[in-house]
Image (spheres, rainbow, N blue to C red):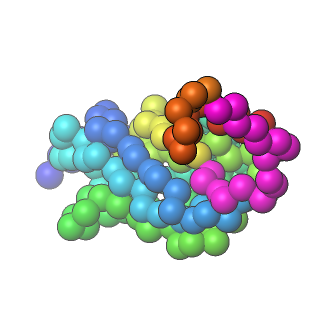
Amino acid sequence: AVVDRAIPTHLAGGLSFTDTDVDGGQIGGVVRVARAADEAAVDQYVLYWGAGPAERLVVGGEPARVAAVAVGAPRAEYGLSSDTPLPAGATHVLVYTANLDGEMETGVAVELVDKAIPTLAPSSVSFLDTDELLLTVGGTITVMKA
């Protein structure tokens, strides 16, 4: 039998991630992959930390792989547990379609936004009451960042 082998030619349909960990420098949440329009040549979706929207983060001389999600999985997603350290230099999560012959050269990216509870108080807060009525207030509150 003749088998035509090739790396995938269809990108993942998209990628999303929302950080649910409120500690700075740590992330957690579910990375969701929108499936490729045609998965015939795709066996898995491989997730990497990205140093940009099109650049895999390299750690110890190797691309920093997060996980692989099989095409046959009920959902194309991967859960990052809370308190997952955000690798130095990581700005994105990238996903590449892959099979036994290799990974597609082009991937899809989502920017990482590290949600965190502020640790510093505002440098100042001021309020100017511009409402002239007795027992009512109205005006502008100004909060200066730390």
Locate residue 73 relative to residue 133 in the image: left or right.
left
Looking at this view, name the residue that lies furthest to the left. 1
Q: Position of residue 64 (x, y in %)?
A: 65, 54
Q: Position of residue 139 (x, y in %)?
A: 59, 30
Q: How many labels were placed on the picture?
A: 0
Locate residue 66 relative to residue 60 in the image: left or right.
left
Q: Residue at x 64, y 42 (%)?
A: 91
- Give the position of the C terminus as an image quadrant: top right
Q: Position of residue 124 (x, y in %)?
A: 82, 42
Q: Position of residue 29 (x, y in %)?
A: 47, 63
Q: Which of the 4 image quadrants contains residue 8?
A: top left
Is residue 24 among what the camera can see?
yes
Locate residue 8 relative to residue 142 in the image: left or right.
left
Q: Residue at x 81, y 54 (%)?
A: 120
Q: Which of the 4 image quadrants contains residue 131?
A: top right
Taking 25 as reference, is 97 above or below it? above
Q: Residue at x 69, y 31 (%)?
A: 128
Query: Is residue 120 found inside the magenta-colored segment of the image?
Result: yes
Query: Is residue 78 found inside the magenta-colored segment of the image?
Result: no
- In-front residue for pair 91/67: 91
Taking 89 as reference, is 47 above or below it? below
Taking 32 as reference, is 74 above or below it? below
Q: Which residues are magenta?
A: 114-129
Q: Which of the 4 image quadrants contains residue 56?
A: top right
- In-front residue for pair 51/144: 144
- In-front residue for pair 106/108: 108
Is residue 87 among what the camera can see?
no
Q: Residue at x 85, y 43 (%)?
A: 123
Is most of the magenta stretch helix, strand or loop? loop
